[in-house]
Amino acid sequence: MKKKKNTKNYKNMPRRIQRVNQLIKEEISQILLREIDFGKSFVTITDVDASANLIQAKIKISVMPQKNTLAVIKRLQRNVYDIQQQLNKKLKMRPVPKIKFVVDKISIQAQKVEDLLQKIKIEEKS
């Protein structure tokens, strides 16, 4: 039995994934800005991580204030179908990755470090 020769050009794959990630980030940002009211929360898309086969994309978000993170994630999960439909209409590519919202843990850690630095700064002034 002959093995099929792989004809995909994997050298361009990372660049393509990067471009898809950036495009998804821009479009989701616009959709969230227009369509979803987060109240007094400030939601930022920090990163998009599409799988190599473009089946799924993790949308990493940070929320300020952090205490509202759970409420924001629940709201996004309730609206993920509508957001996905709008993304499907905007992007002229197939397949459009299935989106999943996750909390960006790096931004949470960065905020903790920032808070500790502020605390140290205040203590030094006293």
Image (cartoon, rainbow, N blue to C red):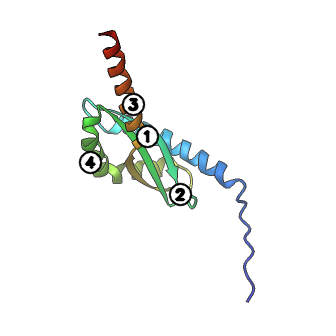
What kind of residue is marked 2?
Answer: Ser
Using the rendered view, name the quadrant where residue 45 is placed.
Answer: top left
Q: Return the x and y of residue 43 as percentages of the image width and height.
A: 35, 35
Question: Which residue lies under the disc numbered 1?
Answer: 106
- Which sits earlier in the primary sequence, circle 1 or circle 4? 4
Question: Which residue lies under the disc numbered 3?
Answer: 113
Mark 1–mark 2 distance (CA, rounded to whole Å): 20 Å
What kind of residue is marked 3?
Answer: Val
Mark 1–mark 4 distance (CA, rounded to whole Å): 20 Å
- Which sits earlier in the primary sequence, circle 1 or circle 2? 2
- Which sits earlier in the primary sequence, circle 2 or circle 3? 2
Tag 1 near tag 2, CB within 8 Å: no
Asked whether 92 or 122 is in front, the reply is 122
Mark 3–mark 4 distance (CA, rounded to whole Å): 26 Å
Numbered disc 1: secondary structure: helix
Which residue extends farthest bottom? 1
Tag 1 near tag 4, CB within 8 Å: no
Numbered disc 3: secondary structure: helix
For mark 1, does the 10 Å Cα neighbourhood hold few (<14), some (14 to 19), or many (20 or more) residues? few
Check residue 74 in the rendering and tell me which mark sits there, or answer none: 4
Question: Mark 3, mark 4: which one is toward the viewer?
Answer: 3
Is 116 placed left or right of 58 in the picture?
left
Is 7 placed left or right of 30 in the picture?
right
Asked whether 57 or 108 is in front, the reply is 108
Mark 2–mark 3 distance (CA, rounded to whole Å): 30 Å
Q: Residue at x 49, y 56 (%)?
A: 97
Check residue 51 in the rendering and tell me which mark sits there, or answer none: 2
